Amino acid sequence: MARGNVLIGQSGGPTSVINSSLAGVIDGATKTRGIGRVFGMRFGIEGVLNDYLVDLGSESAAIRTGLRSTPGSALGSSRLKLKDEHFPTVLKQLKKYDIRHYFMIGGNDTMDTIHRVTKYANENGHEMIGVGVPKTVDNDLHGTDHTPGYPSAARYMALSVLQAGLLARDMQKVDQFVIFQSVGRSAGWLPAATALARTSELTAPHVLLLPERPFNRDAFLQAVAAAHKKHGFASIVCGEGLTNPDGTPVSVSQTRDKFGNVEFGAMGGTSAAMMLHRIIADEFGWRGEFQVTESLPMCAADRGTKLDFDEAFACGRQAVKLAAKGEGGVMVTMQRTNRPGQPYAIEFGTIPLSEVANHERPMPDKYITKDGFGVTRAFIDYATPLVGPLPSYASLAAKRAKP
């Protein structure tokens, strides 16, 4: 391992466990021979450009331990897309602080940043190893079974729809339907997780709308009507990235971020949930509710899973182990090793950063029902060990009394 200092950054939206990954990198770096100081970027790559690095090695042991259960992005995040003119400044800063080991915690765009920065540095005579630590609640990173952050966000979604489903069931004489919207630009892993809320007592959610399937208005209305007829109310869960058959977002947002991604919750458009609410109300004349969580599943540490916090920390440590062996240009991955019916288990692997940056991972067809409005048993088996057991609530027998 080349001698020198470490630089760590966080980028994009947070997760409940992103700081646990940060703690894992710090822990691994401070215990690895040959590593000097450990720096953090203040507000992602902008901290490098603005010469604002923080000395993570000077943080107390209590703070480092506390990071393992702290939500948000402790270093501060950024969505700045690097341009060609930024690279000379970045390289100057890397040399100034003698950065030889470069770790970033993030998603597709973050992996692209690591790949571009390390490539530029090495091509310009500054030897540096870059390793990516996966992070996203969307669970759409290519090459890994799941990403740190997804299990906790999935649990948030499942608990929310479980509890909101009880409310909707009991308020069906007031509101005939409820729509719950999840984050997730182009993958349905989060809305799909709400299917775990279904029990013998609670039927919600009834209709899932996943970004992997184009929105079919007529089929959707038929599914809603059928659910209402059978259950007395309709519970619908949609992904924010739901699109029409022509590819336009149902949210009709025209606002995009610096990476060209549609900002579904931005001004200048409306949410998918609002549009679906309007469609149902116009068709049936029903009163209903819509619930849009936006970033809440990304920061709800109180609903986080122990599995998620532990795996996030382990991914951070694994990134340092890879760098110590001189293995750069990769992202840490997790792969399941258990066979069906056996206890959940994973092992670590790697995937080239260039592959992660250029691919997304939608839900495979085997996880989606043929009608497109639900998930299969295979998905339930996939998600259950990640989300963990959900609470059980009492339901009245509600036997009609006789005079």
Image (cartoon, grey):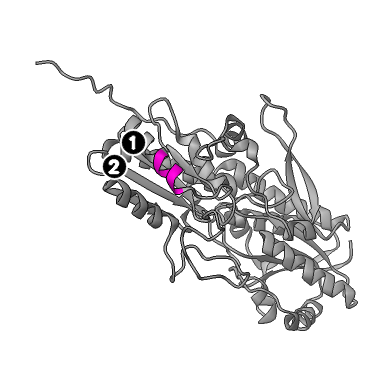
Tell which of 363 and 153 is nearer to you.
363
Q: Where is residue 185 in the image (x, y as percent from the top left)?
A: 56, 57
Q: Quick check: is 357 in the magenta stretch? A: no
Is the Cβ of the residue at disc 2 closer than 8 Å to that at disc 1?
yes
Magenta stretch bounds = 217-222
Residue density around tag 1, few if under 14, some if 14–19, many if 20 or more, within 10 Å: some
From the viewer's perspective, is 177 left or right of 237?
Answer: left
Q: Which residue is drawn at 75% across and 34% down?
A: 337
Which residue position is annotated with label 1?
Answer: 228
- The quadrant in which the N terminus is found is bottom right
Label ID, residue 176: 2
- Would residue 291 be visible to someone looking at this image? yes
Q: What residue type is labelled 2?
A: Gln
Which type of secondary structure does the marked residue at label 2 adopt? loop
From the viewer's perspective, is 259 left or right of 287?
Answer: right
Q: Which residue is drawn at 72% across and 30% down?
A: 338
- Would residue 160 be visible to someone looking at this image? no
Tell which of 42 and 215 is nearer to you.
215
Residue 105: quadrant of the picture:
bottom right
Tell which of 287 and 337 is nearer to you.
287
From the viewer's perspective, is 15 left or right of 124?
Answer: left
Earlier in the chain: of badge 2 and badge 1, it is 2
Tell which of 303 and 38 is nearer to you.
303
